């Protein structure tokens, strides 16, 4: 429990109303205190008078309360009663891990965090979208890749997890995503890996280019979540992030205004579908090579439409352009980028060309 009682006996701050009212990791306190001495232990946001800030004290013993600045400005001189009934003691770190086996030991990695109390976009949205991605992946009749999916406390959780699994992760992970801030309806955001040149980066940029051309492209210098650990020197995992409003870049961030009213079913669904596109592209991403020289005759293989429409001409154009770059050097995402079509428009083309033995999966 935690609360402040004003000189008139009114409980003006109550932990039971919002756990954001208490500075994280506050030591116990139970004392009468003047307003002058209380003020250094109060945190508010003058620029957001109706927001309760989210404040945490790391590795330094102190105590404090967070409150709306509109309330703080109304406090009158006198003696207040401040109570924080807390305990600081040795505990444990809890994380969740789900491994979905695939046809190969190569892995796709999804990480989300569970540590920010009472915030919706910066906290709840990531686990929600990741949970439904896991549910969808578990229903697939077959998976090419193995999926490593974890729910951890941010920073300390990723460091702990890496300390236990780094060797296997460096060996097996071909692409990964840090899933956070995916619940609002702002433009999509993309945060790259350290050098921005991994398969995860290529897939994320391709999908966002064709689903939300106005997406915001950040630099790795703008990092602030667990990509700091996954992409750090010596770890060097191929991890990028697709978000909506990026952490630290929207006014509601780390305040009580980042609530269920800030996120929406549409925002969550759009984010789920963006990641679903990415994972599907990764599953289908192969290097292909044509099996014959020069352009094949499509009509005798029933690949040429019997009627000429705009759609049929586009299909033939995309098919021939795809074949033009099936040289054993380009994967599916690279070809989609080069011929300027969404990768999902090539899935059916690949199936048809494979069925007629005009292309084959190439491995050097």
Image: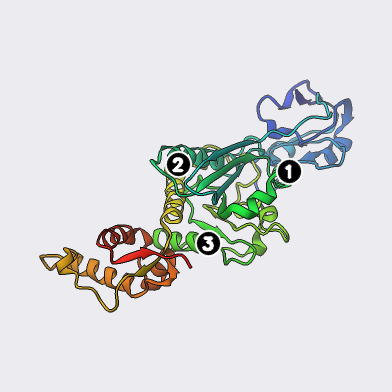
Return the residue found at the far top. Answer: 9
**Is residue 91 placed above or below 224 in the rendered structure?**
above
Examine the image and state in which quarter residue 346 appears: bottom left
To which residue does mark 1 refer?
Answer: 160
Quadrant of the image occupied by residue 219: bottom right
Tell me if residue 21 comes above or below residue 48 in the rendering. Answer: above
Cβ–Cβ under 8 Å for marks 2 and 3:
no
Q: Earlier in the sequence, mark 2 or mark 3?
A: 2
Q: Are marks 2 and 1 in contact (CB under 8 Å)?
A: no
Q: How is the image coloured?
A: rainbow
| Labels 1 and 3: the sequence-earlier one | 1
Name the residue located 28 percent from the left edge and 63 percent from the top edge: 357
How far across and how far down the image is residue 358, in percent?
Answer: 28, 67
Front residue of 69/144: it is: 144
Q: Is residue 319 above or below residue 229?
A: below
281 lies left or right of 54: left
Give the Cα distance between marks 2 and 3: 20 Å
Q: Residue at x 86, y 37 (%)?
A: 62
Q: Residue at x 59, y 52 (%)?
A: 172
Question: In this figure, which residue is indicated by the disc labeled 3?
Answer: 199
**Mark 1 secondary-structure assignment:** helix
- Is residue 343 visible in the rendered image? The answer is yes
Residue 313 located left or right of residue 229: left
The outermost residue toward the bottom is: 294
Using the image as rendered, state which of residue 279 and residue 224 is in the foreground. Answer: 279
Kindly indicate the quadrant of the structure image that contains residue 347. Answer: bottom left
In the picture of the structure, the residue carrying the numbered disc 2 is 137
48 vs 314, left or right, is right
User: Where in the figure is residue 67, as x and y percent of width and height?
Assistant: 71, 37
In the structure shown, which secondary structural element does the residue marked by tag 3 occupy?
A: helix
Label 1 environment density (alpha carbons within 10 Å; few <14, some 14–19, many ≥20): some
Q: How far apart are labels 1 and 3 at the CA level?
A: 25 Å
């Amino acid at each position: 429990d935690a609360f402040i009682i004003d000189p008139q006996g009114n409980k003006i701050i109550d932990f039971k109303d919002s756990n954001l009212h208490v500075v994280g990791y506050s030591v116990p306190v139970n004392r009468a205190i003047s307003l002058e001495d209380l003020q250094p232990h109060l945190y508010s946001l003058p620029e957001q008078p109706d927001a309760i800030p989210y404040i945490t004290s790391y590795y330094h013993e102190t105590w404090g309360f967070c409150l709306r600045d509109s309330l703080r400005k109304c406090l009158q001189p006198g003696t207040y009663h401040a109570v924080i009934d807390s305990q600081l003691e040795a505990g444990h770190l809890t994380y969740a891990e789900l491994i979905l086996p695939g046809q190969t030991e190569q892995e796709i990695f999804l990480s989300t965090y569970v540590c920010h109390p009472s915030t919706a976009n910066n906290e709840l949205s990531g686990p929600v979208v990741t949970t439904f991605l896991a549910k969808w992946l578990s229903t697939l009749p077959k998976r090419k890749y193995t999926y490593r999916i974890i729910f951890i406390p941010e920073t300390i959780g990723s460091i702990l997890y890496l300390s236990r699994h780094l060797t296997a992760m460096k060996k097996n992970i071909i692409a990964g995503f840090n899933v956070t801030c995916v619940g609002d309806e702002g433009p999509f955001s993309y945060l790259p890996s350290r050098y921005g040149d991994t398969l995860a980066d290529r897939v994320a940029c391709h999908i966002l280019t064709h689903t939300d051309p106005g997406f915001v492209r950040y630099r790795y210098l703008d990092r602030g979540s667990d990509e700091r650990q996954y992409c750090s020197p010596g770890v060097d995992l191929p991890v990028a992030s697709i978000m909506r409003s990026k952490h630290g870049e929207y006014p509601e961030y780390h305040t009580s205004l980042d609530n269920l009213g800030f996120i929406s079913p549409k925002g969550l669904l759009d984010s789920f579908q963006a990641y679903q596109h990415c994972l599907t592209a990764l599953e289908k991403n192969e290097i292909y090579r044509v099996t014959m020289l020069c352009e094949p005759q499509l009509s005798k293989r029933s690949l040429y439409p019997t009627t000429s429409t705009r759609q049929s001409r586009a299909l033939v154009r995309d098919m021939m352009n795809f074949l033009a770059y099936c040289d054993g050097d380009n994967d599916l995402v690279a070809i989609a980028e080069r011929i300027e079509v969404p990768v999902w428009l090539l899935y059916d083309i690949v199936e048809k060309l494979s069925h007629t033995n005009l292309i084959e999966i190439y491995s050097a």
